Amino acid sequence: MALAQAADNVNAVPSHIDTANRKNLALLIQLRWMAVLGQVVTIAIVHFGLRIPLPLAPMAMVLGALLALNALSHLWLRQHLHISSQALFSALLLDVAALTVQLYFSGGATNPFTALYLLQIALAAVLLPGRGAWLIVVVTCVAFVGLIGINQPLAVQPPTSLLRLHILGMFVCFVLGAVLLVIFISRMSRNLQERDTYLVELKRRAAEEDHIVRIGLLASGAAHELGTPLASVSVILGDWRRMPEISQNPEMLQELLEMQAAIRRCKSILSGILLSAGEARGEAPVVTSLHRFLDEIARDWSDGRPSGTLQYHAGSGALGEDTRIVSDPALKQVVTNLLDNAFEVSPGWVRLNAERRGDMLRIEVLDLGPGFTPEMLENFGKPYNSTKGRRGGGLGLFLVVNVIRKLGGSVSAHNRQPGGATVTVELPLAALEYREKDRG
């Protein structure tokens, strides 16, 4: 059941690409606020401090347009979950247009703040795909060339002071551009790195889920193939049981009964495999309680093993109020798999703890074995990561981690002192709780 939901869970994962674009657009909005503040301060210093007349009315209109654009961008960002590269391109293009208009009213290409075009190009190179970044380059180059012949020159008196002001302006522009580049591009690069990291993780999970599907198909096929010979052996054992030579021999009859019990156990295991693989759909879900579900796991696993091997602790105090759940064969197989692994390294003692913590179910499997190596802990849950030294080992824990992940939970492991290891499973009870819609 859990494996059949793999594709749906992948599609339900939020897009980290959109998340990165949202963060980057928010940074552009912050940068625009700083640009508005910087332009107000610069215009005030030049016009009132240096006594260089500027057309305040049209320049103030540009600042007002930037303020309105930022307010609308805030609202748009809050109402739209999907932020495309085209939206980032449009935001950068509007910033280039506003800068061009301000430069037109303040000397054109002679204004040292034309170097801020490079900041827009740098942002485009980080945020946009190749074609968008090159379009910003073309637009800024055309704007720069246009400002050479089309501008309102500054009325600087005496003219000899123009060079000094130009150098001073270049220095201020250099410092401003350097600070903004370090702050914003580093933050944008971090956003993009988080997106790339998520994509790598998503690809890894997709590969693991494909691996699980192939294992599930193999298990389902094997279960079907084994069903026929098991049925034949069951019929033969039934015929033998009616034979006088066996029915009248207590020792042989006891051995035959044990063989029939083993056959029934094998059939039960195969039925669980087929159910976990998504077959036997015609049956209604089996509703049980959390206490009974865990008790059955402990009892079934203990059958056939030495008495006292399993120390089971999951009383009503630990689990709290009993909850009706749907008996999930995949979860049962997960716990059984963990108990089997613990029994292999610690055949004399295995402990199973279960408790409820709020809305989470916590299951612990403890053993007295040698524990996990550092490499095992680092790669816990990855396929073929095993200390048993046999080919194909490690698939059990790999399936455990992925089944629990599909149910919305997590699996962790650590070594205990003075020896042994603990594997902990945590999953939300909402993934198991019985609802009326499950009846259909």
Image (tube, helix red, strand yellow):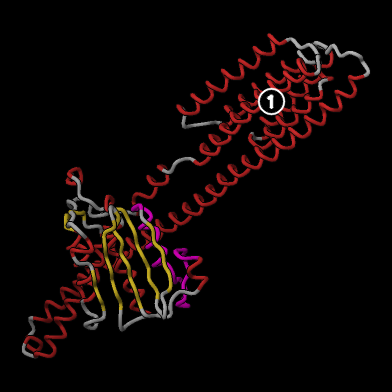
Q: Position of residue 88 (x, y in %)?
A: 60, 29
> Magenta segment: does it hold 400?
yes
Please identify the residue farthest to the front as the structure is shown.
49
Report the number of discs. 1
Q: Picture quarter containing residue 303? A: bottom left
Circle 1: element type: helix
> Magenta segment: does it hold 145?
no
In depth, the one of 280 and 21 nearer the eye is: 21
Q: Residue at image x 83%, y 12%?
A: 153
Tell me the residue that label 1 is attached to: 38
Q: Amino acid at mark 1?
A: Gly
When the figure is inspected, residue 6 is found, relative to residue 299, above or below; the finding is above
Please identify the residue farthest to the right as the structure is shown.
160
Q: Is residue 156 left or right of residue 71?
A: right
Q: Is residue 194 left or right of residue 281?
A: right
The reply to whether residue 266 is visible in this rendering is: no
When the figure is inspected, residue 375 is found, relative to residue 247, above or below; the finding is above
Q: Picture quarter containing residue 425? A: bottom left
Is the residue marked by circle 1 packed among few (<14), some (14-19), or many (20+) residues within 10 Å? Answer: few
Q: Is residue 298 left or right of residue 54?
A: left
Q: Position of residue 215 (x, y in %)?
A: 39, 61
When the figure is inspected, residue 360 is found, relative to residue 84, above or below; the finding is below
Secondary structure mainly formed by the magenta segment: loop
When the figure is inspected, residue 232 is found, relative to residue 9, above or below; the finding is below
Q: Residue at image x 54%, y 24%?
A: 73
Q: Picture quarter containing residue 57? A: top right
Read off the magenta span.
379-408
